Image (cartoon, rainbow, N blue to C red):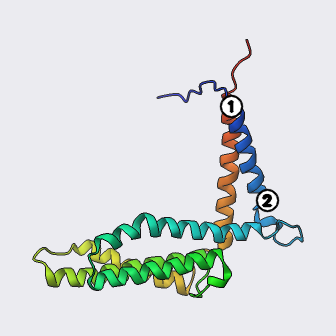
């Protein structure tokens, strides 16, 4: 079993500072402040909307844009463009309320929309793949696409988790990361000669 070894570092204090900033952010974003009239009472829920937008943009430009460039046009290309534009509008709506063209809000409902869109495009891909190719479309992937459409609709109609749950998870991760970075920075402190 390997032990975790920490080497002394000259810039150990940066870990401590970043860890302290994470811990303070976790405390400020905590949902406990929501029923107060403190200036940072709603920062947590605003942060959840920004997190949703960032996750959507990562999905759009990290995954869906590659699918879009490889689709080669046709019905699948058009459906992928529609999916891209719809999710981009949802991401913009999460950042700026004047761009809320599609009236879906909440982390679970947006996740459901993403699943539904991707599953629908994959079902159409399976249909057109079967018609134009001698190679069979994988049945297991078609089952996954149908499950994505079903779960997506369920998440839109009846959310499985709330934004408050997402906020609590985010706050706990921030606090744990802050505590770890403070500990790591303290362990990296060089010994005085």
Asked if 175 appears above or below 75 in the picture, the reply is above
Residue found at the far right of this picture: 37
- The residue at 69%/66% (across/down) is 47
Q: Is residue 21 left or right of residue 98?
A: right
Q: Which residue is mark 2?
A: 28
- The residue at 33%/74% (across/down) is 144
- The residue at 28%/86% (across/down) is 75
Q: Closer to the N terminus: mark 1 or mark 2?
A: 1
Residue found at the far top of this picture: 193
Asked if 27 appears above or below 12 in the picture, the reply is below
Say which element carries label 1.
helix
- Name the mark on residue 12: 1
Asked if 187 appears above or below 67 in the picture, the reply is above
> Viewer-proximal residue, 171 or 16?
16
Q: Is residue 28 left or right of residue 136?
A: right
Q: Quadrant of residue 141?
A: bottom left
- Name the mark on residue 190: none
Say which element carries label 2.
helix
Can you give x and y, in whole percent of width and height, for residue 94 in the image? 62, 76
* Residue 149 shows up from this direction: no
> Viewer-proximal residue, 183 or 147?
183
- The residue at 58%/70% (across/down) is 53
Can you give x and y, in whole percent of width and height, for residue 64 in the image? 40, 70
């Amino acid at each position: 079993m390997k032990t975790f070894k920490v080497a002394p570092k000259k810039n150990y204090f940066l870990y401590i500072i970043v860890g302290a900033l994470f811990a303070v952010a976790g405390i400020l974003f905590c949902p406990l402040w929501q029923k107060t009239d403190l200036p940072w009472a709603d920062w947590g829920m605003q942060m959840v909307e920004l997190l949703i937008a960032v996750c959507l943009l990562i999905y759009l430009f990290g995954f869906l844009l590659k699918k879009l460039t490889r689709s080669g046009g046709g019905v699948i290309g058009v459906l992928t463009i529609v999916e891209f534009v719809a999710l981009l509008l949802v991401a913009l709506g999460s950042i700026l309320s004047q761009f809320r063209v599609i009236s879906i809000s909440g982390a679970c409902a947006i996740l459901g929309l993403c699943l539904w869109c991707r599953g629908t495009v994959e079902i159409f891909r399976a249909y057109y793949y079967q018609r134009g190719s001698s190679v069979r479309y994988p049945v297991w992937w078609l089952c996954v696409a149908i499950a994505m459409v079903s779960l997506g609709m369920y998440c839109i109609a009846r959310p499985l988790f709330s934004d408050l749950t997402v906020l609590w998870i985010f706050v706990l991760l921030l606090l744990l990361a802050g505590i770890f970075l403070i500990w790591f920075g303290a362990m990296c402190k060089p010994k005085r000669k």
